[in-house]
Image (cartoon, rainbow, N blue to C red):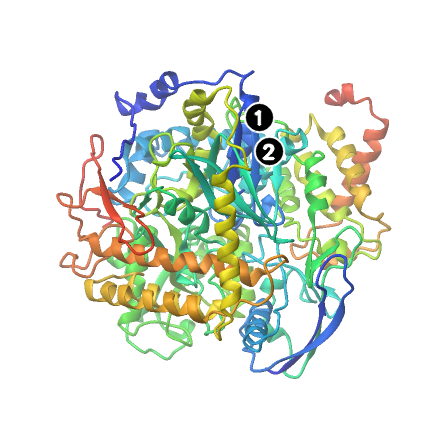
């Protein structure tokens, strides 16, 4: 069994990162060009890491399955990015951002990593501004901030409702500059299908060119995965259609531990499902909760349109239950509250599957112009999808899978337990514990890519000076290529009767019902019985048309869904083992008298990691105890 | 809704293509255009056929991955809307819909409705950035930026790089895309040091792949993000200035 060493530096928390940077190995500037690094994914984490490592002088190869690095799903992040600048003079500090993030994560993250995240947050804003990211500004020309859930200070920087787009374009442009300088080589429309190991360390990857189907190997001194999260295991989520778990799952199968897979975030403000043909869910930014008020009718099954329901017959349930934070409670709390309203048959909309998010008061108070300036693009998006104008009638929203806090286990250096293999951004499990606060994903992606990995990777690389990467002609690469080709051929040869999507949709139904907003032992056991049956049927009865040597998006999808089946099982097992409720993980067996999550800080204060033992042998469960020296463990209260 | 689709099918960049007709029956008016194609594709797979390939990803109108010609209009004829945000309620029962890939020499077809937009990356690589390395940036509030300038920059920066502007242009010109990036950076104080060099490099790279602008204005009409052709005027001005200016002294202008 693997033993875990998080390599957290000694010393007071505020000195750890500074001391660590002094203590770890460096690679001198003239030697950096002797190292090759592979980066998979070009979202905020991948693109910022590739650009920064290129600037330092490393030889970088970067891979994306999109046609351009700029398409990565970070681009869809709307609301903003947190930083402890305290520009608003409301009492923010690095320690407060650290404290809020640990608390928001329901005390299931590693203190030292979170503190470092808060520490570098300010540099991110400086860096992005210098790159030309057009953050929102006040009339005096200085940067504007807004509030997000789980915080009582305004620390969120934003660019309209398109913050992720602008930050990603900043990172993409920095990357483009390194590509033009020849420091980084870009492989677009290329999907990583395996990590290659030699003598217990990561030495390269196998990649499929999605245009001509060619499967090739690439070797390097280190491999970095910035491949995002796995919310698409639920089929319907706010993730882009192509988001998948394959890169991290393949790494997991090669020895990297997968941590806290059951920690998934269901975002409270998404547009409700309309019917079975729906392909994905659309997020309405959490920032809308700054000005929108959430309510449902007092009475169950109220048939009246929203604007006909008088004020006295509306239940602003978040303001009622959580007066201190009101509509800005953290996402997990808001989602569960919405779920309860719908369970009480107080849901709204044609399918009774939503709650109202109402801007009438804000429009009266601030005027339509101000609301339009803040949220115009979101209102327009809502109107396109629902055919309703949120300036006149309240939005309807419902929780949807959005982000996954779980991911590959990493140490303080962001290296997995596999030497030479790193995981950054949403792909790792590092900073958000059991629940991520709004506007913290962008912060973490860029922190990892710009300001953490470029330092920590040198500590590993220094030991490999003047070595050449393992040849791609070697046995380990040929074997991995063969496995990838065999898998593709196998999927194409089944020629059954059901489409990939039909399996994915069914898997999603199982997962959202039993491993979604609320989980229970009987439900999880039912899911654990159903998933293997469905997976077996998939491998006997899926139909994947076309060939492996051409553009074939059905084949790409089939490979991803096959991996989702294996991950889904592990998520349910992890959820079963975690006998407590914390953050996004809510076990019906573990709740307080008033229905809030009930943590078990004695028995469950650990991260839960899983080691792959082969297709037919169950995973080994490994726990990393979490110690809290600086934040006092307390029942989270947003009342 | 019952629809008839006339769809361009082409196996690869070097093969010839053709239109084929498909029935799309029982489509929900609340579906998006791409969800309608999903339904058609699932039926094609079930019947043993090869599905229609099209690019798409976020389905929120922000990644810029999707985009097809719908009845001759890039992204369809609803203004300011990407293909993924177009909903079937904008069509009528019984409609016949013609679906084609972007048609431009600079954007060759990869398969069916999928085109190669790599030239857009080449244009950005030529200078669509501000040359600052990670680290060492001054405090973000050191340089105040007038709100109006930041807003104008943001308007231009909203471009999603979908290439509808090229597809709409009779000359297959990429002026709107290129000028949007130039305006985003050239309107900001941080973009000034490289302003004229950036303009020259990006314009010249653009011209390697795409046609010339003759002020039709079709690009602005087609743009799903309603990017203004005023940006093209700014680009032309900067290009002219760059051609005359001694760049060593540009910072003193």
Q: Position of residue A326 (x, y in %)?
A: 30, 53
Left or right of residue A165: residue A596: left
Q: Chain of mark 2?
A: A
CA separation in Å, label 2 and label 1: 9 Å
Q: Chain of mark 1?
A: A
Residue at 69 percent of width and 66 percent of height: B76
Image-quadrant location for residue A18 = top left
Q: Position of residue A471 (x, y in %)?
A: 54, 33
Circle 2 residue: A174
Q: Position of residue A82 (x, y in %)?
A: 42, 38
Q: Residues within 10 Å of mark 1 (few under 14, many from 20)?
A: many
Residue at 60 percent of width and 62 percent of height: A547
Image quarter where the N terminus of chain B lies is bottom right
Residue at 43 percent of width and 63 percent of height: A235
Mark 2 near mark 1, Cβ–Cβ under 8 Å? Answer: yes
Q: Secondary structure at mark 2?
A: helix
Q: Earlier in the sequence, mark 2 or mark 1?
A: 1
Q: Is residue A560 above or below residue B129?
A: below
Q: Secondary structure at mark 1?
A: helix
Circle 1 residue: A55
Left or right of residue A3: residue A468: right
Image-quadrant location for residue A591 = bottom left
Which disc is residue B184 wearing?
Answer: none
| Residue A276 visible | yes
Name the mark nearer the viewer: 2 or 1: 1
Q: Is residue B123 above or below residue B31?
A: above
| Residue A322 visible | no
């Amino acid at each position: 069994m693997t033993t875990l060493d998080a390599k957290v530096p000694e010393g007071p928390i505020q000195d750890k990162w500074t001391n660590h940077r002094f203590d770890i190995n460096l690679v001198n500037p003239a030697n950096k060009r002797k190292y090759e690094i592979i980066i998979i994914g070009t979202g905020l984490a991948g693109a910022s890491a590739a650009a920064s490592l290129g600037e330092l002088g490393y030889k970088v190869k970067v891979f994306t399955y999109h046609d351009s690095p700029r398409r990565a799903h970070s681009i869809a992040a709307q609301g903003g990015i947190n930083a402890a600048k305290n520009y608003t003079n409301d009492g923010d500090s690095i320690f407060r951002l650290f404290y809020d993030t640990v608390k928001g994560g329901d005390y299931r993250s590693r203190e030292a990593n979170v503190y470092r995240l808060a520490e570098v947050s300010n540099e991110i804003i400086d860096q992005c501004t210098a790159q030309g990211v057009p953050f929102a500004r006040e009339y005096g020309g200085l940067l504007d901030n807004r509030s997000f859930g789980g915080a009582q200070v305004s620390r969120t920087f934003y660019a309209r409702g398109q913050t992720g787009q602008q930050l990603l374009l900043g990172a993409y442009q920095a990357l483009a500059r390194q590509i033009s300088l020849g420091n980084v080589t870009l492989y677009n429309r290329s999907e990583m299908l395996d990590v290659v190991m030699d003598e217990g360390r990561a030495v390269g990857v196998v990649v499929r060119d999605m245009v001509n189907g060619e499967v090739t190997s690439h070797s390097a001194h280190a491999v970095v995965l910035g491949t995002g999260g796995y919310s698409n295991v639920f089929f319907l989520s706010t993730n882009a259609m192509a988001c998948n778990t394959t890169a991290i799952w393949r790494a997991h199968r090669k020895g990297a531990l997968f941590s806290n897979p059951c920690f998934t975030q269901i975002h409270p403000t998404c547009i409700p499902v309309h019917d079975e043909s729906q392909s994905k869910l659309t997020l309405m930014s959490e920032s809308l909760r700054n000005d929108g008020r959430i309510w449902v009718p007092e009475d169950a099954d109220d048939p009246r349109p929203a604007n006909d329901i008088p004020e006295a017959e509306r239940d602003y349930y978040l303001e009622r239950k959580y007066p201190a934070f009101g509509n800005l409670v953290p996402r997990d709390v808001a989602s569960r509250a919405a779920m309860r309203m719908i369970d009480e048959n107080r849901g709204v909309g044609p399918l009774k599957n939503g709650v109202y998010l109402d801007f009438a008061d804000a429009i009266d108070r601030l005027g339509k112009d101000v609301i339009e300036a803040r949220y115009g693009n979101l209102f327009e998006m809502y109107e396109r999808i629902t055919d309703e104008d949120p300036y006149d009638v309240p939005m309807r929203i419902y929780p949807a899978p959005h982000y996954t806090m779980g991911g590959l286990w990493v140490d303080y250096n962001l290296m997995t337990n596999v030497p030479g293999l790193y995981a950054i951004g949403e792909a790792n499990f590092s900073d958000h514990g059991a629940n991520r606060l709004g506007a913290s994903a962008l912060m973490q992606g860029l922190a990892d890519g710009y300001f953490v990995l470029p330092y920590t990777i040198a500590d590993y690389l220094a030991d490999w000076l003047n070595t050449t990467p393992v040849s791609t002609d070697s046995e380990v690469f040929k074997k991995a290529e063969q496995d990838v080709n065999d898998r593709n051929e196998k999927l194409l040869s089944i020629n059954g009767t059901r489409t990939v999507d039909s399996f994915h949709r069914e898997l999603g139904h199982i997962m959202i019902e039993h491993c979604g907003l609320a989980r229970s032992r009987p439900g999880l056991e039912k899911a654990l019985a159903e998933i293997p049956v469905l997976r077996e049927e998939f491998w006997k009865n899926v139909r994947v048309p076309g060939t492996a040597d051409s553009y074939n998006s059905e084949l790409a999808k089939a490979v991803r869904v096959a991996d989702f089946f294996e991950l889904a099982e592990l998520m349910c097992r992890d959820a079963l083992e975690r006998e407590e409720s914390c953050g996004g993980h809510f076990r019906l067996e573990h709740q307080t008298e008033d229905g809030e999550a009930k943590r078990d800080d004695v028995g469950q204060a650990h991260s839960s990691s899983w080691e792959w033992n082969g297709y037919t042998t169950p995973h080994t469960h490994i726990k990393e105890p979490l110690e809290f020296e600086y934040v006092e463990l307390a029942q989270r209260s947003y009342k | 809704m019952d629809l008839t689709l006339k769809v361009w099918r082409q196996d690869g960049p070097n093969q010839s293509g053709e239109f084929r007709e498909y029935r799309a029956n029982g489509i929900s008016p609340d579906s998006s255009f791409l969800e309608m194609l999903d339904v058609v594709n699932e039926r094609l797979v079930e019947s043993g056929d090869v599905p229609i390939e099209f690019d798409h990803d976020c389905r929120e109108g922000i990644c810029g991955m999707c985009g097809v010609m719908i009845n001759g209009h890039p992204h369809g004829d609803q203004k300011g809307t990407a293909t993924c945000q177009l909903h079937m309620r904008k069509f009528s029962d019984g409609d016949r819909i013609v679906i084609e890939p972007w048609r431009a020499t600079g954007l060759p077809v990869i398969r069916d409705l999928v085109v190669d937009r790599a030239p857009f990356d080449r244009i950005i690589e030529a200078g669509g950035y501000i040359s600052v390395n990670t680290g060492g940036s001054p405090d973000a509030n050191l340089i105040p930026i007038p709100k109006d300038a930041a807003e104008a920059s943001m308007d231009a920066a909203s471009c999603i790089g979908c290439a509808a502007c090229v597809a709409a242009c009779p000359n297959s010109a990429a002026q709107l895309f290129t000028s949007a990036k130039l305006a985003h950076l050239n309107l900001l104080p941080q973009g000034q040091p490289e302003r004229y060099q950036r303009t020259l490099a990006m314009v010249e790279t653009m011209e390697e792949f795409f046609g010339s602008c003759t002020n039709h204005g079709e690009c602005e009409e087609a743009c799903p993000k309603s990017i203004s052709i005023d940006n093209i005027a700014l680009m032309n001005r900067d290009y002219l200035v760059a051609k005359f200016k001694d760049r060593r002294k540009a910072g003193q202008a």
